[in-house]
Amino acid sequence: RAYIQWRTCPLQKLPGPRGKFFLIGEFFTVFKEPFFKPHTRWWKEHNFPPLMSYYSLFGKWAIIPTDPEIIKQIMTAPSAQEPVRYIKNFYFFRYLVGDGLVSLEGRTWSRHRRILQPCFQTGILKEALTAAVPVKVNRLIEAWERSEGRVIEVYAHMSAVTLDILGEVSFAHDFRA
Protein backbone atom coordinates (compact mmCIF):
# COMPACT_ATOMS: atom_id res chain seq x y z
CA ARG A 1 0.00 0.00 0.00
CA ALA A 2 2.79 2.46 0.91
CA TYR A 3 4.52 1.70 -2.37
CA ILE A 4 1.36 2.46 -4.36
CA GLN A 5 0.89 5.77 -2.51
CA TRP A 6 4.52 6.67 -3.21
CA ARG A 7 4.26 5.66 -6.87
CA THR A 8 1.08 7.70 -7.46
CA CYS A 9 2.03 10.73 -5.34
CA PRO A 10 1.54 14.04 -7.19
CA LEU A 11 4.81 15.31 -5.69
CA GLN A 12 6.60 13.28 -8.35
CA LYS A 13 5.58 15.95 -10.85
CA LEU A 14 7.69 18.56 -9.01
CA PRO A 15 11.31 18.87 -10.17
CA GLY A 16 13.94 17.10 -8.15
CA PRO A 17 16.01 13.92 -8.08
CA ARG A 18 14.32 10.57 -8.36
CA GLY A 19 16.12 7.77 -6.55
CA LYS A 20 16.06 4.32 -8.01
CA PHE A 21 14.78 2.49 -4.97
CA PHE A 22 11.64 3.04 -2.92
CA LEU A 23 13.29 1.96 0.34
CA ILE A 24 16.27 4.32 0.35
CA GLY A 25 15.46 7.17 -2.07
CA GLU A 26 18.00 9.98 -1.67
CA PHE A 27 18.76 9.22 1.98
CA PHE A 28 22.41 8.24 1.53
CA THR A 29 23.09 11.15 -0.82
CA VAL A 30 21.80 13.64 1.76
CA PHE A 31 23.50 11.78 4.62
CA LYS A 32 26.97 11.51 3.04
CA GLU A 33 27.38 14.99 1.58
CA PRO A 34 27.90 18.24 3.52
CA PHE A 35 24.80 20.05 4.79
CA PHE A 36 22.51 21.18 1.97
CA LYS A 37 25.10 20.47 -0.78
CA PRO A 38 22.92 17.90 -2.59
CA HIS A 39 19.87 20.17 -2.36
CA THR A 40 21.80 23.08 -3.88
CA ARG A 41 23.12 20.85 -6.66
CA TRP A 42 19.61 19.52 -7.45
CA TRP A 43 18.27 23.08 -7.50
CA LYS A 44 20.89 24.10 -10.08
CA GLU A 45 20.43 20.91 -12.14
CA HIS A 46 16.68 21.55 -12.39
CA ASN A 47 17.06 25.18 -13.48
CA PHE A 48 16.22 26.87 -10.14
CA PRO A 49 12.56 25.83 -9.62
CA PRO A 50 10.45 27.51 -6.90
CA LEU A 51 9.59 24.12 -5.37
CA MET A 52 11.47 20.82 -5.46
CA SER A 53 10.72 17.40 -4.09
CA TYR A 54 12.66 14.25 -3.35
CA TYR A 55 12.03 11.16 -1.30
CA SER A 56 13.99 9.54 1.44
CA LEU A 57 13.64 6.33 3.39
CA PHE A 58 10.54 4.25 2.68
CA GLY A 59 9.22 6.69 0.08
CA LYS A 60 8.83 9.58 2.55
CA TRP A 61 8.54 12.75 0.46
CA ALA A 62 10.28 16.02 1.26
CA ILE A 63 9.36 19.34 -0.32
CA ILE A 64 11.93 22.13 -0.56
CA PRO A 65 10.60 25.63 -1.18
CA THR A 66 13.24 27.78 -2.87
CA ASP A 67 11.24 30.84 -3.90
CA PRO A 68 11.62 33.65 -1.33
CA GLU A 69 7.92 34.53 -1.56
CA ILE A 70 6.85 30.96 -0.81
CA ILE A 71 9.31 30.76 2.09
CA LYS A 72 8.04 34.10 3.43
CA GLN A 73 4.45 32.85 3.28
CA ILE A 74 5.36 29.66 5.15
CA MET A 75 7.46 31.43 7.78
CA THR A 76 4.90 34.17 8.46
CA ALA A 77 1.82 31.95 8.48
CA PRO A 78 -0.20 32.32 11.70
CA SER A 79 1.25 29.57 13.85
CA ALA A 80 -1.23 29.70 16.71
CA GLN A 81 -4.08 29.13 14.32
CA GLU A 82 -5.98 25.84 14.49
CA PRO A 83 -5.89 23.85 12.25
CA VAL A 84 -2.23 24.46 11.48
CA ARG A 85 -1.63 25.58 7.87
CA TYR A 86 1.86 24.15 7.37
CA ILE A 87 2.29 20.93 9.30
CA LYS A 88 5.77 20.01 10.56
CA ASN A 89 6.36 16.27 10.56
CA PHE A 90 9.23 16.18 13.03
CA TYR A 91 8.30 12.90 14.70
CA PHE A 92 11.87 11.63 14.88
CA PHE A 93 13.18 15.02 15.96
CA ARG A 94 10.48 15.27 18.63
CA TYR A 95 11.54 11.85 19.89
CA LEU A 96 15.16 13.06 20.20
CA VAL A 97 14.70 16.51 21.78
CA GLY A 98 11.12 16.49 23.05
CA ASP A 99 8.43 19.09 22.59
CA GLY A 100 9.72 22.61 22.01
CA LEU A 101 9.47 25.56 19.66
CA VAL A 102 10.96 23.60 16.78
CA SER A 103 8.59 20.65 16.98
CA LEU A 104 5.36 22.09 18.41
CA GLU A 105 2.50 23.63 16.47
CA GLY A 106 -0.71 25.53 17.02
CA ARG A 107 -1.76 26.81 20.43
CA THR A 108 0.90 24.80 22.27
CA TRP A 109 3.62 26.45 20.16
CA SER A 110 2.07 29.86 20.84
CA ARG A 111 2.10 29.26 24.61
CA HIS A 112 5.78 28.21 24.55
CA ARG A 113 6.66 31.21 22.39
CA ARG A 114 4.99 33.63 24.84
CA ILE A 115 6.96 32.11 27.72
CA LEU A 116 10.28 32.53 25.87
CA GLN A 117 9.55 35.95 24.36
CA PRO A 118 11.11 38.03 27.18
CA CYS A 119 14.49 36.38 26.52
CA PHE A 120 14.56 37.82 23.02
CA GLN A 121 13.79 41.46 23.74
CA THR A 122 15.85 43.83 21.64
CA GLY A 123 17.34 45.67 24.61
CA ILE A 124 18.57 42.49 26.30
CA LEU A 125 20.07 41.12 23.08
CA LYS A 126 21.68 44.45 22.19
CA GLU A 127 23.32 44.65 25.62
CA ALA A 128 24.60 41.07 25.45
CA LEU A 129 25.91 41.50 21.89
CA THR A 130 27.62 44.78 22.80
CA ALA A 131 29.52 42.94 25.51
CA ALA A 132 30.31 39.76 23.54
CA VAL A 133 31.16 40.89 19.99
CA PRO A 134 34.21 43.11 20.72
CA VAL A 135 35.85 40.45 22.89
CA LYS A 136 35.36 37.69 20.33
CA VAL A 137 36.41 39.86 17.37
CA ASN A 138 39.57 40.99 19.20
CA ARG A 139 40.40 37.34 19.88
CA LEU A 140 39.92 36.62 16.16
CA ILE A 141 42.17 39.53 15.15
CA GLU A 142 44.88 38.35 17.56
CA ALA A 143 44.72 34.85 16.05
CA TRP A 144 45.05 36.32 12.55
CA GLU A 145 48.03 38.44 13.61
CA ARG A 146 49.76 35.36 15.05
CA SER A 147 49.29 33.53 11.74
CA GLU A 148 51.15 36.17 9.74
CA GLY A 149 52.51 34.77 6.47
CA ARG A 150 50.15 31.78 6.44
CA VAL A 151 46.92 31.34 4.50
CA ILE A 152 43.86 31.96 6.65
CA GLU A 153 40.62 30.08 6.10
CA VAL A 154 38.35 33.11 6.59
CA TYR A 155 35.06 31.20 6.27
CA ALA A 156 36.02 28.75 9.03
CA HIS A 157 37.20 31.55 11.33
CA MET A 158 34.04 33.62 10.76
CA SER A 159 31.88 30.56 11.43
CA ALA A 160 33.80 29.91 14.64
CA VAL A 161 33.50 33.50 15.89
CA THR A 162 29.77 33.46 15.07
CA LEU A 163 29.35 30.24 17.05
CA ASP A 164 31.27 31.74 19.97
CA ILE A 165 29.12 34.90 19.97
CA LEU A 166 25.87 32.93 19.75
CA GLY A 167 27.04 30.57 22.47
CA GLU A 168 27.87 33.39 24.84
CA VAL A 169 24.78 35.52 24.13
CA SER A 170 22.24 32.70 23.90
CA PHE A 171 23.57 30.07 26.29
CA ALA A 172 26.18 31.86 28.46
CA HIS A 173 28.67 29.27 27.21
CA ASP A 174 32.05 29.72 25.52
CA PHE A 175 32.37 27.04 22.83
CA ARG A 176 36.00 28.05 22.23
CA ALA A 177 35.44 27.39 18.53
Image (cartoon, grey):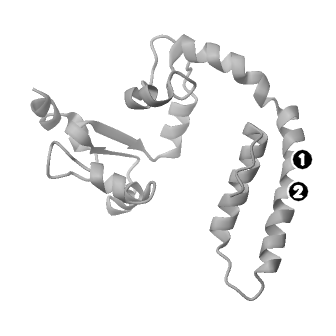
Is residue 102 shown left or right of residue 128? left
Circle on res. 130: 1
Three-letter residue code for mark 2: Pro
> Does 140 appear above or below 109?
below
Q: Position of residue 144 (x, y in %)?
A: 78, 75
Quadrant into which the C terminus falls: bottom right
Q: Which element type, helix, strand or loop, lies under badge 2?
A: helix
Q: Which element type, helix, strand or loop, lies under badge 1?
A: helix
Q: Name the residue beneath numbered marker 2.
A: 134
Q: Which image quarter: residue 14?
A: top left
> What residue is rendered at 64% in x and 67% in y?
155
Disc 2 to disc 1, C-alpha distance: 7 Å
> What residue is rendered at 35% in x and 40% in y?
63
> Does 113 appear above or below 53?
above
Near mark 2 (Cα within 10 A), the count class, few <14, some 14-19 or many ≥20, is: few
As drawn, which residue projects farthest toward the bottom?
Answer: 149
Is residue 83 shown left or right of residue 158? left
Three-letter residue code for mark 1: Thr
